[in-house]
Image (cartoon, coloured by chain):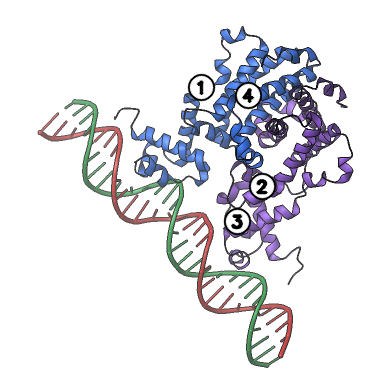
Chain colours: A blue, B purple, C red, D green
Amino acid sequence: MPPSSDDTRTRLVEAAGLMFADKGFDAAGVREICHEAKANVAAIKYYFGDKRSLYKAVLEHVHVCKENLGQVMASDEWQAHAPLHQLKYFILEMVKEHLASQKPAWHLEIMLWEMTRPTPEGKEVIELQLRPMATHLKKILMQIVGDDIPEETIWKCGFSIVGQVLFYYVHQAIARQLAGDTIYNQLTVEQIASHIYQFSVAGLATVANRPELVTQIDS
Amino acid sequence: MPPSSDDTRTRLVEAAGLMFADKGFDAAGVREICHEAKANVAAIKYYFGDKRSLYKAVLEHVHVCKENLGQVMASDEWQAHAPLHQLKYFILEMVKEHLASQKPAWHLEIMLWEMTRPTPEGKEVIELQLRPMATHLKKILMQIVGDDIPEETIWKCGFSIVGQVLFYYVHQAIARQLAGDTIYNQLTVEQIASHIYQFSVAGLATVANRPELVTQIDS
DNA sequence: GAAATTTTAAAACAAGTGTTTGACATGTCG
DNA sequence: CGACATGTCAAACACTTGTTTTAAAATTTC
């Protein structure tokens, strides 16, 4: 077997990942994938069985490769920080990952397909990727708003925060088209994250009826 | 010519709209569309020329049919209301439209395809549909935060608000999966809209450095 | 080195795609 | 009536799709 980083199987998964991310499962053709991977079409049958199983392999590859913000921040070190500081970092990292990710962008792009147009195969990866983030964000928010706030309110606040972040990723074409290139290009990752942080802490303070929170915003 | 509400051309556009909304342009097949429209495949060539032109006709149909919140609220009657009241209504109507629309859902679903996976044909419809809303929301926000706030900040606030609303529509499958059916089913349109309104006014107040705004939230 | 196994390659397969053709109705007007 | 545009239909077209077959090459194993 050739070195594992360059064998046909790996090349296929990565080429397929790119293709699926770009055009979605249906529109990506096996011939184009194999051409990109410098492999023969029959290789798909040989290594995976069929196209769907290749897609499953891609999803699994995403799952094992993509580091998870929820898991990273679950460490004891992070737990020691102030809740607001954790939230600030959470938002910043999430914005960074979506708007300035250096690693292969198709990991995220595939997740986006699964988030907007779910397939049966993808549900598990979504769960494994998003659940830790949701759990962790919930924990942070409960520390901020206090644990006498009903759970569904926590969820709504979480959705408000994540919704803001995802907007810049999912609808960046629209955002750019509407705001215009001049204004849109002025926006930096730090600026966006900082805005969402400020905006959200204020929102949390109101929902939790703790106006003093706003004064604690440190940037 | 048969009555215009039931002629072949109209049936084709509507069946195609449903199909395109459901599966996207590529995955929707002309035979399936024509079967649903009780028309022959050749009818597409006869009335539109080809599949892409049929899609263009669908987009145009969406454009002329779909009423526009931005235009509706541009009326003098609405301008008379307090800015916060306008914002509250804007958010409520937007949430309603996305989560409890009684009219054919495929209008919105097609817009969603164009917003996440734009096609050359769709750009104009997006512009025509979203521009009035963006313009109007901007106007409302400027009244709230004051006109000494830089334009890019206004845009960021707008994105924060719209991002929250769209989250519930674009990612409702994820939201439901994460929060669980029990909690998710408790959420009503009014509740969601009210939450986003409160959350956002607080955010605006902070960004504009006008904390007194929060006290004016009327629900 | 020979046999067995794993991997690649080209070509063919059946089913599906959007598109087109030409015949056949149907209604309209001179 | 006949001529003509309008609309519909089944069938075929050229092409692409995912999948399979068959065989040769490369690699491993004995």
Q: Are callouts 1 and 2 both on one chain?
A: no
Closer-to-camera residue (A163/B7): A163
Image quadrant in which you'd find residue D15 = bottom left
Q: Secondary structure at mark 3?
A: helix
Q: Which residue is mark 4?
A: A193
- Please name the amino acid that badge 1 sits on: Glu
Image quadrant in which you'd find residue B161 = top right
Label 4 chain ID: A
Closer-to-camera residue (B57/A131): B57
Q: CA distance from mark 4 to mark 2?
A: 27 Å
> Dot 2, crowdedness within 10 Å: few (<14), some or many (≥20)?
many
The disc at residue B148 is: none
The disc at residue B32 is: 3
- Give whichever of discs 4 and 1 has the lower sequence position: 1
- Against A38, is D30 above or below? above
- Please name the amino acid that badge 3 sits on: Glu
The disc at residue A67 is: 1
Label 2 chain ID: B
Q: Secondary structure at mark 2?
A: helix
